[in-house]
Image (cartoon, grey):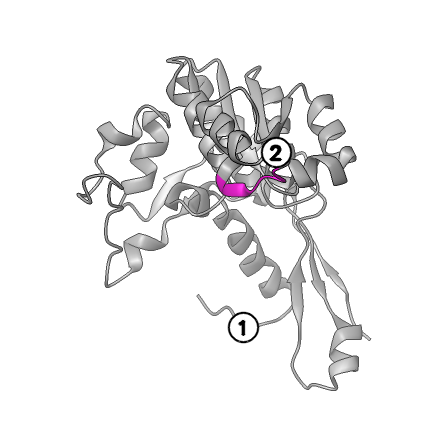
Amino acid sequence: MGQRKFTLEENEIPENWYNIIADMPNKPLPPLHPGTLEPIGPEALAPLFPMALIEQEVSMEKWITIPDEVRNIYGLWRPTPLYRAYDLEKVLDTPAKIYYKYEGVSPSGSHKPNTAVAQAYYNKKEGVKKITTETGAGQWGSALSFACQHFNIDCEVYMVKLSYDHKPYRKSMMNTWGATVHASPTELTEAGKKILALDPNSPGSLGIAISEAVEAAMRDDQTKYALGSVLNHVKLHQTVIGQEAIKQMEKAGICQIL
């Protein structure tokens, strides 16, 4: 059996995020406004996101520089290790070589700080005082709480009530990093009040928590909203994983495919 783990040095943390849209022959269509069904412009996103993230959302540049402040925090857990899954190969009785990238070494235990740190940084640069967000099982809320703590930004998390009750340690983790955590739906927003009026025992949902977090951000000029998935700039920040993996696959003697 050969080498199981392939690692990199801190100076090999990627210096740029890779924007896949630049290489797509068919560019994605712009998001539509839910009310008008017209393409959404920067002015519609400005109440929720700092302008730097809006620019990343629509950017056609292939490479976007990772700020030194973000790379320095990445260095707390990046580069993450690449493993050869010998035991899985054996169980599957396959001639294939199976590798996986392990992101669980981050402070919050997932890949999500890769974008949380970047989003907190750009919000701080624009003078934002608080970030609201939603979380289901608590991984994204934990990641953003960790990131906000580094940049001295208040973090308010609307956590799906069912998870809030069943995963108290995730709430404790967020509280440890200074975040305020609410069991959603709440009486703090109009969206939450409407749900509770219909069902006082509502277990909540991610959609409800999103509605509450967005509403809380929209009513305060010094508050923005952060999302841990779906959007282009979120996926952009996760490309550090693949860039590291390419270098590690080269160390493993596997042909580079990109």
Above or below residue 101? Residue 129 is above
Is residue 171 inside the magenta stretch?
no
Between 192 and 141, the one nearer to me in the picture: 192
Position of residue 222 measured from the top left corner of the image (x, y, whole percent): 41, 13
Give the mark nearer the N terminus: 1 vs 2: 2
Decide: is 107 above or below 104.
above
State how far apart marks 1 and 2 are (Cα).
43 Å
In which quadrant will I find the C terminus?
bottom left
Determine the main secondary structure of the stretch shown in magenta.
Answer: loop
Residue 102 shows in this picture: yes
Res. 68 in view: no
Query: Pointer 1: residues within 10 angstroms few (<14), some, or many (20+)?
Result: few
Magenta-colored span: 202-207
Residue 255 is marked as: 1
Residue at figure coordinates x 50%, y 68% from the top left: 256
Q: Is residue 204 magenta?
A: yes
Using residue 71 as the reference point, say whether residue 38 is left or right of it. left
Q: Could you tell me which secondary element the residue under label 1 belongs to? A: loop
Foreground residue among 60 and 172: 172
- For image coordinates 66% across by 73% down, the residue present is 98
Tell me if mark 2 has few (under 14), some (14-19) or many (20+) residues whose alpha carbon lies within 10 angstroms of its own: many
Q: Quadrant of residue 78?
A: top right
Residue 165 location, x and y as percent? 74, 36
Q: Type of residue at label 2?
A: Met
Residue 161 screen position, x and y as percent: 65, 36
The residue under label 1 is which amino acid type? Cys
Numbered tag placed on residue 159 in the rendering: 2
**Contact between labelled residues 2 and 1, with CB atoms less than 8 Å apart:** no
Query: In the rendering, at what x and y percent does residue 212 appear?
Result: 48, 29
Give the quarter of the image for residue 76.
top right
Is label 2 in a helix, a strand or a loop? strand
